[in-house]
Amino acid sequence: MTGRISEIFGGMPQRLAMGEQVVAYRDYTQAEVFFHLAREKSARVESLRQRFAGRRITKLFVGNNLAPAGFQLPGVETMPLPKNWFERAMKGELQDMAAEIAGAIVLINNNDLAVGESAPGYVRLFGQSPDTIFLGWDYDNHHWMESSLALAAHTDLYFPAHNENMYLLSKINALTSGPIPCACVQWTRQFLADNLGEMLRRERSDQPLGMHFFYQQFAFRNQTVVTLNQKYKQIGFAERSFQAKSPFERLAEWMDHKTHWIIPVLNDVPIRIFDALASGGVPIVPESLRFLAPVADIPRDSIVFYGPDDIFHPQAVVARAIKLFDEGGQAGIAARHVYALTHHHGTDRLRRMVAMAQERLEFAPLIG
């Protein structure tokens, strides 16, 4: 078997070319332009520190993609930004927008900039807002590099969700944190807690749920979905209409199943893991995530891992997940739910981001 591994490895196409690409990637970041960018960003951060040091910030604007998490801070007026709000900067409203957010923190997700002219509008607003702190949480730094590079350049502190491309991104923005993993953000903590009773009494299907959006560029992942769909019809490609459902309708779909099959686009840690736990279910995730933070810390009676052969023969791994669910009973549902709300809700992640901004920019603490 070991010989077979070596044979397969030796036959990998373009293996040497991949090494050359890594060297080119490294050499690219030695260009002088990175020094000039670092100097300009450092000057902006120092200016912000001088403006905000010791000040009490009273306004926080949260992007439309993160607003459903219900993040709040004591004594701070929190305002969700409407969808596509940044497009207004392209329609003659730039100065009014800059005045509205002056003296505040603006906390966005990369998906807030993904539609229409939101991205160029945001870049304009960033350039005209010297008295505003911009924080960016990037869900897609593992594959959407054009977006990630732009977000890192146009935020004061930048928070990638995944391990990939960290060296390049930190050259774009020195205030790049270690990964701040994705988390449950589509429901507030209170909403989830209020529905624990429904989670405990609801009849659940033994069929795993695993509806994923189709992305043309991820052929391996798409084939995994197609293969599993031959055995389980609730694993497949989702309609975008899911996002238009009410919070309870979305939660009900999760609560209707004991287990949830998770298929990342690459080797990322998807939000779906934490949505599954928050709704009381057992996530089934790839072996490649077993020792990655924060999956490494999830209690092993709350998660099941699958390997390549399980994609073709999934019944055994699904049976293991169902057994975990059934043996845990209502206590297991409640434990997974509480664990997710305590450790993996979006409000926890956003609080960490604001705390890092407070340390670097020295404004008065917002978190007691």
Image (spheres, rainbow, N blue to C red):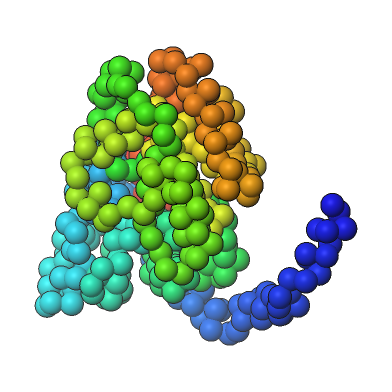
Q: Nearer the viewer, residue 235 or 39?
A: 235
At a point 40% along the width and 64% down the height, the residue shown is: 215
Q: Nearer the viewer, residue 160 or 213?
A: 213
Q: Position of residue 162 (x, y in %)?
A: 52, 55
Residue 5's place in the image compared with 182, above or below, is: below
Q: Position of residue 273 (x, y in %)?
A: 46, 40
At a point 46% along the width and 69% down the height, the residue shown is: 217
Q: Nearer the viewer, residue 151 or 192?
A: 192
At a point 26% along the width and 40% down the height, the residue shown is: 250
Residue 61 as seen in the image, left or right of residue 3: left
Residue 50 as seen in the image, left or right of residue 31: left
Locate the C terminus by quadrant: top left
Q: Is residue 330 visible?
A: yes
Residue found at the very far right of the displayed protein: 3
Q: Which quarter of the picture shows residue 127?
A: bottom left
Residue 311's place in the image compared with 125, above or below, is: above
Residue found at the very far front of the displayed protein: 230
Residue 24 as seen in the image, left or right of residue 233: right
State how many labels appear.
0
Q: Is residue 95 visible?
A: no
At a point 39% along the width and 39% down the height, the residue shown is: 209
Q: Position of residue 36 (x, y in %)?
A: 51, 81
